[in-house]
Structures are given as structure tokens and as C-alpha cells.
Image (tube, rainbow, N blue to C red):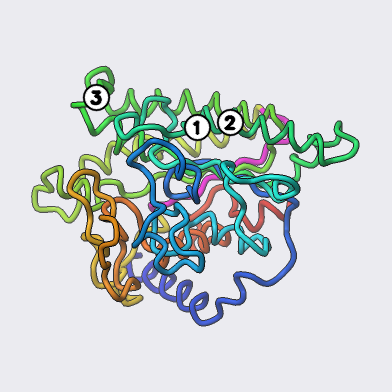
Amino acid sequence: MASTITKWIFITILYFIVKPKILIQGQKQIPCSFFFGDSLFDIGNNNLLVTQAKANYPPYGIDYPDGPTGRFTNGRNIADFLAQLLGFDKPIQPFATASGSDILNGVNYASGASGIRDESGSHLGDRISLSGQLINHATTISRLGQLISPPNTVNNYLNKCLYTINIGSNDYINNYLLPRFYRTSVLFTPDQYAEALIQKYTLQLRTLYNNGARKIVIIGLGFIGCIPQELANFPTNGSSCVDSINNNVQLFNNRLKPLIDNLNTNLPGAQFIYINTTSISSGDPSAIGIKTVNAPCCVVSSSNGQCGPNQVPCSDRQQFVFWDNFHPTELLNQVTATRAYKATLPSDAYPTDILHLVQQ
């Protein structure tokens, strides 16, 4: 199985590197796309917040056409690639700066350090939790009422749009795994915590549905126990990752398929799908030329694990999995987006992938 996964990862990446124009050709497959989440999706919503979780300075954006924009990577992030795959000719604008008719294409609400739980990431400063992002989305819906005629057709417009949510990592990285700042690890066992997250997440997803969302993509959590920050903070006991962290996170991931089934069964017209990040992340990265899997490309700050301002990063970013101590490089973002859009393996998406969802 490992060799099969490696083969498909190699084919997927090679195809899109050799023929990048495929990512930007074609017409929009949906009228608009909305993104919710954390730093894996954030494209600038944190720039004006008082927080350590921001990336609007070099070397972030070193490979992005506009330079540092607030994306927590060297180039494009997953939301950027998904927008291209969906046929949009430019990135979906961040809520912080989206205005006028731009919002007809959708809005990106993602905020670095945010989580399902409102307190997640609070020790880093300001951030917009998922609950706050849903409030911002309600503001967007009100603005759409001024652009779409007649206003009572806004809901029909939203029914046709795509909603993609990538959140939950900070509920572990910047909450449960930091007992000096948060009490969740004392109050909850790992299983209880996963269940508490799912219960809150369910209410938030129902709010999104009640505001007109029908086609909704839920992206699962990756191997948090393998990121450089956790490798530095916790013993691995001879493993290549902190297995205990990955096991705890998997308790959350294991609840996502049943959540999808529950929502699709009980919410009329709902079409929720689950993207399995752990499936997409499996395999041997060396097959595509990646040589470093457990260290960052940029010089990170000892205080927060992000790139130090104006430090010179590694020269060949395509040889690294991680850009800083938390976030993947552009290459890995491209792989995740590509396989979320069109599944390479049956385990990548449930019950279908994004391509088939938008065609329904």
C-alpha cells in the first residue's frame, strides 16, 4: 500500500508541476467559494490584528507574486489552489479587505491561530475563532443582499456556492497540548476532548447550513505529531513522530465521517463531504524529491516557531515538507488541494471529492 500511495503522490504532483496551466484554465464551476479556518487557509485576515500569528513579512511569500500577504507559507496555500481548481481567475479575497462586487465570488474568513473553541490560540493574541468567522459570514450575507436582485434570492445563490472549512489543529497545538496556558488537558481525557470538539463543531456547521450553505467541505486534521514544533516539544521515544499526539488527533478525525453522515441525513439538501488529510499525507515524500521532512525551510524564531523576520530561507523550497515549524511549503499545499479536489485514492475523500460535489 505504501508504494502505491507513493506512486500516486508522485504522479499527481508531476502532472500539475509539468502542466500548471491546468490549474487556472476553465470557467467557474460554482458562483462563489467561501473559506473558513486557521493559518492553513489565512491569506491576510490577521495582518491588522494584535497577534503573534501573522505572516505579512519576509521571508513569508518569497515565492508568491505579491510577496508577503499574510499567507503562512512561501507561496500559495491550499485555499489559493482550490480557488484555481474551481475555475476562479484570482484568489478569493480575505474578509479584512473584501469589498464591493468582490464578495460575489466568495470570501476567505480564515484566521491564523483560530480554532473550533473560542479560547484556542488566545495566548498568541487576537484571532478570529470559527464562531467569529461565522459572524463575519453573516455580515457578508447582508452585503450580498445589496448586490443581488431581488434580495430574497440571496439564499438560492448561496445554496450553489462551495464552503470549505479547515480548522481544529489549533485546538490541539495551541490549546490541549499547552497545559501551561489552557486547562483542557486537565478537564478532558483525549477522547472526551475530541467529543467536545465535535459537539461544538456540529453546532457551528448547523449555523452555516441555516445561513444557506449546502455544499460543505470538511478538511480533517493532519499528522500534528510530525510537525517540527511538536518534535521539539515532546519526546518521540524512537519514532519519527510524536505518536501519542497523532493518536489523540485521530480520535477527532475518526468522528468526522459519522458527523458527515449525521448532517447529510438530518439536514434536508445538505451535501457535506470529508477530506482525509492523513490519507493525502501518507507515502514517501522522497519520491518527489523532498529530502527534509522534520525541519523547517526558514530560520524560525525560538519564541513562536514562525519564520524570523527577514531571515534567508533554504534555497530549494521543493525539497522541504515544512516552511516553518507549523506550516507546509507551497508544494505540499498543492498536493493537498489537488487530491482534495480530485481524489487519488478512495480514502482521500468521503463520500466523494470536491470535483464531484460541485457537479451535483
User: Residue 134: which numbered mark, if any?
Assistant: 2
Q: Which residue is found at the position 39% from the left and 67% from the top?
A: 62
User: In the picture, residue 355 is in which quadrant?
Assistant: bottom right
Q: Which residue is found at the position 64% from the left and 46% from the top?
A: 98
Q: Which residue is found at the position 62% from the left and 26% from the top?
A: 207
Q: Which residue is found at the position 56% from the left and 42% from the top?
A: 96
Q: Separation of disc 3 and disc 1 at Cα?
A: 21 Å
Q: Which residue is mark 1?
A: 130
Would you say 304 lies left or right of 104 here? left
Residue pushed farthest bottom? 18
| Rendered position, 336 above or below 195 | below
- Amino acid on which disc 2 is placed: Leu
**Dot placed on the residue nearer the N-terminal end, 2 or 3:** 2
| SS assignment at label 3 | helix
Would you say 326 lies left or right of 20 here? left
Coordinates of residue 221 in the picture (x, y in percent): 39, 44
The answer to if 106 sits in the magenta stretch is: no
User: In the picture, residue 171 is in which quadrant?
Assistant: top left
User: Residue 185: which numbered mark, if any?
Assistant: 3
| SS assignment at label 1 | helix
Coordinates of residue 329 in the picture (x, y in percent): 37, 63
**Foreground disc of the pair 3, 1:** 1
- Amino acid on which disc 3 is placed: Ser
Which segment is the magenta one? 267-278
Q: Separation of disc 2 and disc 1 at Cα?
A: 6 Å
Q: Are marks 2 and 1 in contact (CB under 8 Å)?
A: yes
Coordinates of residue 136 in the picture (x, y in percent): 60, 32
Would you say 310 lies left or right of 62 here? left
